[in-house]
Amino acid sequence: MSITDELIPVLKKLRLSGVLKTLDLRTKEAADGVISHHDFLFRVCCDEVQRRDSKQLEQRLRRASFETTKRLEDFEWAFNPKVPKSKLVDLATCNFIEKHENVLLIGPTGVGKSHLAQAIGERACRAGHSVAYVSAHRMLSTLRASRADQSYDKRMLRFTSPDLLIVDDLGLRPLEGEEPIDVYEVIRQRYERGSMIITSNRALEEWHPLFLDELMASAAMDRLLHHAHVVVIEGHSYRNPPGARKAG
């Protein structure tokens, strides 16, 4: 029986079986005198830390449920010079999450709000934060359905427990029924406990009427804006640039 065979059950018991992936390489380095015994142990441990960090990142990205993989590096800043690049790059440091602040991305369709929101969310995952991405329609549909099977509180946790909640396209359609209450509850329960990124095609002054109740609107917007970065993006749609419209 080789030393590796003897190590396998020990490593599994210690939950270090990932060490086996690079153990042969590190052992050869030590045997060839390339690294000292101290460096051998250090590198084996670093390999395991890197493996665990990578696995945890994969889990955070999967749980975030992004529509597609969006990265800040892939954003076409040159297309629209009006996009406040320095402000968005600063937000991508994710310091606002540490402070439990909110980010509101406002502008017409196609200017890159969803891309930027998910790209900042991707950076947040890499920084070790838990993230949940959801369209406003999907969030409200989920909460509406949860009332029927008595799982409202459980479903609400999906939107209130992550460090960062990204709600895409709020106000794309008017809120109805108990939806204003649901939006208010998400905002209320996250206030000064977690951060939100909300994208919307509606100007900020159009958000109040969405709640269908002035008192509820004031309470929701007061909490939402108390610690908020409001980023207004203007310009043409990436999906339908001026040249394409003229050609059409």
Image: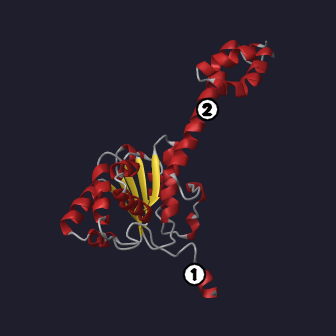
Q: Which residue is mark 2?
A: 50
Q: Nearer the viewer, residue 216 or 33?
A: 216
Element type where label 2 sits in the image = helix
Q: Position of residue 164 (x, y in %)?
A: 41, 49
> Is residue 239 in sight in this rendering?
yes
Left or right of 195, for residue 135 = right
Q: Which residue is mark 1?
A: 242
Category of crowding for the residue at label 1, using alpha-carbon neighbours closer than 10 angstroms: few (below 14), some (14–19), many (at least 20):
few
Residue at the spot x=49%, y=53% of the render? 120
Category of crowding for the residue at label 2, using alpha-carbon neighbours closer than 10 angstroms: few (below 14), some (14–19), many (at least 20):
few
Q: Is residue 18 above or below residue 189?
A: above
Q: Farthest residue toward the front?
A: 149
Residue at the spot x=64%, y=19% of the render? 11
- How many numbered marks, from 0 up? 2
Residue at the spot x=65%, y=28% of the render? 18
Q: Position of residue 109 (x, y in %)?
A: 48, 73
Q: Nearer the viewer, residue 184 or 80?
A: 184
Q: Position of residue 175 (x, y in %)?
A: 33, 70
Task: Tell me the distance, in whole angstroms, between the alpha carbons under discs 1 and 2.
Answer: 46 Å
Q: Amino acid at mark 2?
A: Gln
Q: Nearer the viewer, residue 83 or 167?
A: 167
The quarter of the image holding the C terminus is: bottom right
Q: Amino acid at mark 1?
A: Pro
Left or right of 162, for residue 30 = right
Q: Quadrant of residue 1?
A: top right
Left or right of 157, for residue 220 = left
